[in-house]
Amino acid sequence: MHLLVTGGAGFIGSNFVHHVIAHTDHHVTVLDKLTYAGNRASLEGLPDARLTFVQGDICDAALVDELVAAADAVVHYAAESHNDNSLDDPRPFVDTNIMGTFTLLEAVRRHGTRFHHISTDEVYGDLELDDPARFTETTQYNPSSPYSSTKAGSDLLVRAWVRSFGVRATISNCSNNYGPYQHVEKFIPRQITNVLRGERPKLYGSGENVRDWIHADDHSAAVLTILDRGTIGETYLIGADGEKNNKDVVELILTTLGQPADAYDHVTDRPGHDLRYAIDSSKLRRELGWAPRFSDFTAGLADTVQWYRDNEAWWAPQKDATEARYRAQGQ
Ligand code: NAD
Ligand code: TDX
C-alpha cells in the first residue's frame, strides 16, 4: 500500500510513520507544512526507499489532489493542535482543521480513496471528577475551546462526506498522547525540559484536572488496525485506561528526575480549562481486537524522560521561544 500521511512531521504523525515503516511494507508519503510544530528531524533515520517527504499545505487543493491521486489511503493527522494557542489566535485552527480537512475530503471523493481521520476525545467536552461515566462513540459532541470545536467540525465534515457522497472513511478519537517527538509546548515535555534546564514545572490552576494518557505507539497500532479492519463510516475511540491528574504527573516527572516531588509552581489557569477526559475504548478492543502494549505509565514516562535527556538537540531550539510565549500569558 501507498499511504499519504498528513502532518507526518508532527508528534503523533511522526510516531505513526516510524511505526508503519517498522511493522508493514507500506510506502509512506508525508505531506506536512512544517509549521512551528513540524520538525523534519523527527523522521531522520528512516529509509529513503520507503518514505517521500513533501513540504506543503493541506489547504493547497492542487497539491492535495496530485498526492491523493497517487495514494491508496490517506491518514490525516495534520492540524493545529494546541489549546493554549487556539485561545490566543484561533484563525489558523479554522483554516487548517476545517478548510484543510474539507480540501482532503474533496480530493478523496474525486479519487475514491480510503480516508482515515485522526481526532480527539476533546470533541466530547469534559466530565466531572467524580462522574463514573467515560466517553463512548455515542457521547454527544460538546467541545469547549477553539481547538476542540474545529476538530469537532472536521469530524462532522467527514461523517457528512461518508453519508452524502459515499466517501470510504473512518474516524478515531484518541485521548492524550505521550512519548518521543512531542513539542515542548505540551504538558509532559514542557515539564520534563523545565526540570532538565533547572526550571520549576508549571501547573495550571489547582492541578486537579484529569487526562487519560496513552503512549503514542499504542495510538499508532490502533490506527493501523482501523485502517486494516475498521468498518467504513464508523468511529472508534482509542484509549488505554490511563487517567491521571496533572499534579500526580508533575510529581512523577520530578521524582523520576531525582527532584523533590513538590518542586513545582502553580500558575494562571487556562481559560475554560476542561476538567476531566476519560475514554471507553471497548468497541475498538471488542470489534477489532486491539489492546494497548504500554500499560505501565510510570515505565512509559521514564522512557519518555530518557528520550528528552538523550535528544536535547531536537527540543532545545524551540524551548526559549515557547517559554517566552507562556511568560507573556502569565503561565
Ligand atoms: P502536532 O502539532 O505535533 O503536529 C501537527 C503537524 O501538522 C505538524 O507537523 C505541522 O507542521 C502539520 N501541519 C499543521 N498545519 C498544517 C497544514 N495546513 N498543512 C500541512 N501540515 C500541517 O500535533 P499532534 O499532537 O501530533 O496531533 C496530530 C493529530 O492528532 C491532530 O489531528 C490532533 O488533533 C490529534 N490528536 C492529538 C492528541 C494529542 O494528545 N496530542 C490526542 C488526540 C488526537
Ligand atoms: O504548562 C502546562 N501546565 C499544565 O498544567 C501545560 C502546557 C498544560 N497543563 C495542563 C493543561 C491540561 O490539563 O496539562 C494538561 C495537558 O495539557 P496539554 O498538553 O496542553 O494537552 P490538552 O489540552 O489536554 O490537549 C491534548 O490532548 C488532546 C493535545 O494537545 C490535543 O491536541 C489533543 O487533542
Image: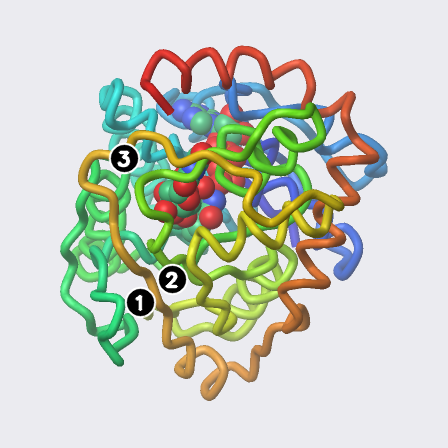
Residue 123 sits above or below residue 56 on the image: below
Amino acid type, residue under disc 1 in the picture: Gly
Q: Which residue is mark 1?
A: 233
**Which residue is nearer to you in this view: 51 or 309?**
309
**How far apart are labels 2 and 1 at the CA level?**
5 Å
Marks 2 and 1: CB-CB under 8 Å?
A: yes
Q: Report the residue marked by disc 2.
A: 170
Amino acid type assigned to the residue bearing label 3 in the image = Arg
Eyeballing the image, is 49 above or below 157? above
Residue 68 visible in the current orientation: no
Nearer-N-terminus badge (3/2): 2
Q: Residue at x 36, y 38 (%)?
A: 204
Q: Earlier in the sequence, mark 3 or mark 1?
A: 1
Label 3 within 8 A of ligand 2 by Cβ = yes
Callout 1 crowding tier (Cα within 10 Å): few <14, some 14–19, many ≥20: some
- Contact between marks 3 and 1 (CB within 8 A): the answer is no
Q: Position of residue 240 (x, y in %)?
A: 51, 71
x and y percent of residue 34 in the render? 55, 20
Residue in view at x 31 percent, y 67 percent? 233
Q: Which residue is mark 3?
A: 270
Query: In the image, which is nearer the foreground, mark 3 or mark 1?
Result: 3
Q: CA distance from mark 3 to mark 2?
A: 32 Å
Kindly identify the amino acid type of the residue bearing the numbered disc 2.
Thr
The vertical placement of 180 against 243, above or below, is above
Q: In the image, which disc is placed on residue 91? A: none
